[in-house]
Image: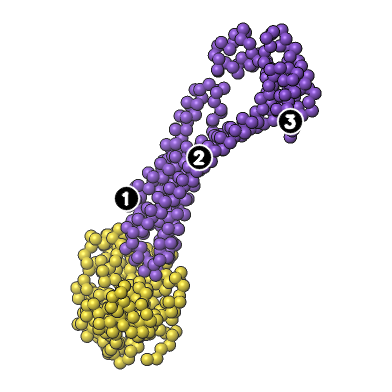
Chain colours: A purple, B yellow
């Protein structure tokens, strides 16, 4: 499959049967690592865009529920006077209950439960608002009011995601290195197995590139064969994970679906691995043959 | 010894060869072979015949001395240019060195493939040459399924298929009967008449005596060229007898001479 005619008996090598399997497993792992990386990246990006420049003001319920509205109005009037704020919006009770439902269950629907009032605040672009100062100002006017600055936890979240992304990249790099190492090993072994035939070809005037081309072409074919098999193993795995994620409560899980661009990138991985195998085999053979007269 | 570099195919000057730290198997070998010459390489077993041939077909580097091939000093020729030089040299290895996984056809076609010859030309020439050496019915046979003589003929066909400028043959008739030996020698002689320089290493003293070509005689690593009337032994045109008489003066031209213009 895919390989051009060979003067060497590369097809029958035990190594030729062993390499596609190794590459299949490596591509399988690489696709999982890459899919994880892409999902994390997309999630971080969505969260970043969604939360950047937003604050949540929380007005705790007063001991006397009748004063809750009054306290809220004071807070809103302070917010209205601040030039850094683009817009603000009070969360309705229904929305609040819906947000609490995953944690409190149906009890969240009970109207007897004292709930804080939440105000979503959106800052103007590049606004330099110190959340702590705002929090102190509001608390001074309405005790029990606090400001939740999303940027702080977002920063931590993004740092975590970036670390995991970095690890996934490292895993990919290790897989690439392992692939290169495996191809170098199999190619060198192949050169030893076919030493006699290569020497004859060399003596009848074959250029190094002619011999290297045969190994490279074979490595590409085996890489693609193994890579496609790895992809075929990985796709159902990813679909399975996606299905399980969909079964979970959507409000607790970030969206981890892969888009068409992501799928295309993953589908291209076997080709990338085949090209790595091809180039590695070629370089290995050229280097080895260069030591011959 | 006078030389003209433009006509010199092989030149050795004070060449010595040793394997590892062992004794020199070739010592101060100095000679030149003119284009179109025909030599036998003789000597006892272990005299260094195969080593000398290996130096000529660039399988070994000399431990000392200078070797030039087709007028170019091997030591100073860039490695990337050596394959092109090797393609001008046809070699019949003593142990054949056929690729056992390839058919007779593919073995003979290999030098042409390596040289990038078109597929249609390869097909035509290889089939014709294999037919001529009597292996028309064995085109697809793998060497291990053939006899020693048949393998030797494949090896010879592979060496001559690209019509080399220099042909080196190490015991090329060792495994064939007299009739086939003569037929193969006809092939070498015809190639020689077309300008190929030929060196045949052999133990066959009968053959060497019968054919009055000069001899490169190796004895314990030392070499001298003896025989014929000159060190530079060119074979005369086909219409004339060779030095000291042609190969086929005994009237054995029984249709076994190849028509090389047709073959190649």
Q: Secondary structure at mark 2?
A: helix
Is mark 2 in CB contact (under 8 Å) with mark 3? no
Label 3 lies in what chain? A
Q: Do callouts 1 and 2 point to residues on the same chain?
A: yes
B106 or A48: nearer the viewer: A48
Q: What residue is disc 2 on? A: A168
- Residue B226 point in image, percent of width and height: 28, 89
- Residue A110 point in image, percent of width and height: 59, 8
Label 1 lies in what chain? A
Marked residue nearer the N-terminal end (1 or 3): 1
Q: Secondary structure at mark 3?
A: loop
Q: Do callouts 2 and 3 point to residues on the same chain?
A: yes
Label 2 lies in what chain? A
A291 or A275: nearer the viewer: A291
Q: How many marks?
A: 3
- Residue A125 point in image, percent of width and height: 74, 33
Q: What residue is disc 1 on? A: A14
Q: What residue is disc 3 on? A: A129
Q: Is residue A38 left or right of residue A283?
A: right
């Amino acid at each position: 499959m895919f390989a051009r005619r060979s003067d060497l008996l590369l097809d029958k090598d035990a190594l030729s049967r062993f390499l596609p399997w190794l590459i299949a497993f490596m591509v399988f792992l690489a696709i999982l690592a890459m899919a994880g990386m892409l999902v994390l990246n997309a999630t971080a990006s969505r969260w970043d865009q969604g939360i950047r420049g937003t604050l949540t003001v929380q007005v705790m319920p007063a001991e006397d529920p009748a004063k809750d509205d009054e306290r809220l109005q004071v807070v809103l009037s302070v917010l209205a006077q601040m030039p850094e704020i683009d817009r603000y919006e009070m969360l309705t009770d229904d929305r609040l209950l819906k947000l609490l439902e995953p944690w409190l269950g149906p009890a969240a629907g009970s109207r007897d439960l004292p709930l804080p009032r939440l105000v979503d605040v959106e800052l103007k672009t590049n606004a330099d608002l110190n959340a702590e100062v705002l929090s102190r100002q509001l608390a001074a006017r309405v005790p029990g009011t606090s400001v939740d600055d999303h940027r702080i936890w977002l920063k931590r979240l993004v740092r975590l995601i970036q670390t995991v992304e970095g690890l996934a990249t490292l895993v990919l790099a290790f897989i690439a290195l392992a692939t290169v190492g495996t191809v170098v090993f199999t190619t060198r072994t192949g050169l030893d197995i076919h030493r006699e035939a290569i020497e004859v070809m060399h003596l009848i005037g074959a250029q190094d590139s002619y011999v290297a081309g045969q190994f490279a072409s074979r490595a590409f074919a085996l890489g693609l064969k193994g890579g496609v098999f790895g992809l075929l193993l990985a796709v159902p795995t990813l679909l399975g994970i996606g299905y399980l994620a969909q079964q979970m409560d959507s409000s607790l899980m970030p969206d981890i679906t892969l888009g068409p661009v992501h799928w295309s990138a993953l589908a291209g991985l076997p080709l990338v691995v085949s090209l790595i195998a091809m180039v590695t085999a070629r370089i290995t053979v050229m280097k080895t043959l260069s030591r011959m007269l | 010894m006078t030389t003209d570099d433009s006509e010199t195919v092989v030149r050795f000057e004070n060449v010595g060869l040793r394997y590892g730290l062992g004794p020199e198997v070739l010592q101060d070998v100095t000679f030149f072979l003119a284009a179109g010459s025909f030599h036998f390489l003789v000597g006892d077993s272990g005299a260094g015949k195969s080593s000398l041939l290996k130096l000529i077909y660039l399988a070994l580097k000399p431990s000392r001395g200078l070797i030039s091939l087709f007028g170019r000093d091997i030591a100073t020729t860039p490695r990337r240019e050596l394959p092109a030089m090797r393609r001008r040299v046809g070699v019949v290895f003593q142990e054949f060195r056929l690729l056992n996984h390839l058919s007779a056809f593919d073995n003979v076609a290999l030098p042409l493939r390596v040289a990038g010859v078109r597929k249609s030309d390869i097909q035509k020439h290889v089939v014709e040459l294999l037919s001529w050496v009597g292996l028309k019915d064995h085109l697809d046979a793998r060497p291990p399924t053939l006899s020693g003589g048949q393998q030797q003929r494949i090896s010879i066909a592979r060496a001559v298929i690209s019509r080399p400028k220099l042909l080196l043959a190490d015991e090329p008739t060792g495994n064939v009967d007299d009739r086939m030996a003569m037929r193969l020698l006809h092939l070498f002689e015809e190639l020689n008449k077309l300008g190929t320089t030929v060196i045949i290493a052999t133990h066959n003293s009968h053959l060497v005596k019968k054919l009055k070509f000069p001899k490169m005689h190796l004895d314990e690593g030392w070499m001298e060229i003896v025989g014929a009337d000159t060190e530079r032994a060119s074979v005369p045109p086909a219409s004339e007898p060779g030095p000291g008489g042609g190969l086929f003066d005994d009237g054995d031209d029984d249709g076994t001479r190849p028509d090389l213009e047709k073959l190649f």
